[in-house]
Amino acid sequence: MVQPLPPGPKAPTADALDHEPPTSSQLRALDVLVGLATTIRTRRSRRKLAPAKIYVVIPAHNESGTIAQTLVSLRDQTLRAHYVIVACDNCTDDTEWKTAREGAQTFRTYRNADKKAGALNQVLARLLPTLTAEDLVLVMDADSQLNATWLEEAELMLRLDPRVGAVCGVFLGENGRGLAVDLQRNEYVRYARTVYRRRQAPVLSGTGTLFRASALREVARERGRLLPGIRGEYYNSQSITEDNEITLALKTLGHRCLPGAGCVTVTEVMPTFRDLYRQRMRWQKGALSDLRRYGFTGVTFLYWVRQAALYAGFCASIICWAIMSWSMALNPSINLAWTLGILGINFAERLWTVRKVGLKGMALSALVLPEFGYDLFRMVVFFRALAAELGNRQVAWNHLQR
């Protein structure tokens, strides 16, 4: 039987964990971007809404180094979850033991060959038939930690608007050392800023998404009919980017998918460029494969446009740099002013958009060349992923052992 996560001890110290926990200042790093949070809390006091029951499902494959932190972040929520289940998927470490030590329920997957999607499907197949239409399900990664008001803010957004099928959070990169880590942290802050400005969730992040139980059941019913996949599956086991695919599924069924005001998650980043390359290859190849399965529809149109814009943007950047270099070589005295003007605008924009990371992130951006190199790295990944999709080639799944 699934058991609730009971009150437990205070968060363990850094010595008790396998790596340094995120600081409170990092968890608050994007608060200034979230103007909706105050409005939502005010509406809660006016509406006097009773909170819904929340069930948490955490897929975990050898997550011994992070699972304790993840469960502590759930225990510290201002709105507590009713049940927490960790799906131990083919674990060979002590993830299950640490989960039990923190008071959460463990679930061992059975002969799962479909990775994260398969693990989630096995748990949800047992859990969802027991839930009411008003209940909510949080799906989050075992290497992510939620800020304290995450569940409260997301739950209220779902309660206030029945058109919303799921609410996700934005994510920040965890503390760490190395150029690859710092570049990803800058990238994540810029992405979070874009998500909040659009007030739309292009992807329901696996770091944390709160679903309506009724919406997940509808997805399972429509698999093989309105939606790609096998009938009865909640997550499409044929997709290598299950979070992106379930976003398309919910939107196809008419549900809104929104970023939660004040919902911020600290998550792992890849420590090396080799790990980062494999992660991003899977992300981009999976996104293209999901769009191919869904085809051209009213829902996917903007996704196709964004993909085209990404590739066009990479090409335009190369052309722009080539034109500036060529013009400077021909007549440097005449073309210096407009070249410096273009570079100055780009420089100011990059500094402004990473100011919430702190001085270290701004200093990295001010150096220009590291982020320019990172853009070239991403460009290579995107075009190789496109070639893999056009050639119908598989890409490797990268799991970071901690």
Image (cartoon, rainbow, N blue to C red):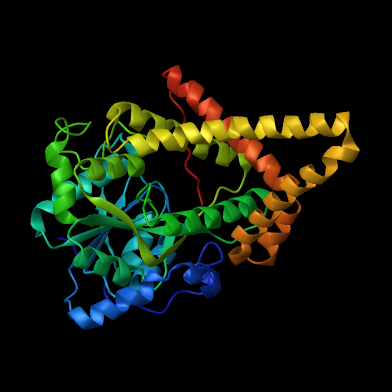
Q: Nearer the viewer, residue 26 or 274?
A: 26
Q: Is residue 235 left or right of residue 333?
A: left
Q: Residue at x 34, y 73 (%)?
A: 75
Q: Nearer the viewer, residue 4 or 44?
A: 44
Q: Residue at x 68, y 60 (%)?
A: 362
Q: Residue at x 87, y 28 (%)?
A: 330
Q: How many marks?
A: 0
Q: Nearer the viewer, residue 360 or 298?
A: 298
Residue 380 coordinates in the image, percent (x, y)? 60, 30
Q: Is residue 346 left or right of residue 26?
A: right
Q: Is residue 299 above or below residue 216?
A: above
Residue pushed farthest front? 334
Q: Is residue 203 above or below residue 226?
A: below
Quadrant containing the N terminus is bottom left
Q: Residue at x 17, y 60 (%)?
A: 162
Q: Is residue 36 above or below residue 283?
A: below
Residue 180 coordinates in the image, percent (x, y)? 64, 48
Residue pushed farthest right? 333
Q: Nearer the viewer, residue 123 or 91?
A: 123
The answer to whether any part of residue 397 appears in the image is no
Residue 21 coordinates in the image, percent (x, y)? 52, 67
Q: Is residue 232 left or right of residue 59?
A: left
The answer to whether any part of residue 297 appears in the image is yes
Residue 134 coordinates in the image, percent (x, y)? 12, 63
Q: In the picture, residue 211 is in which quadrant?
A: bottom left
Residue pushed farthest top? 391
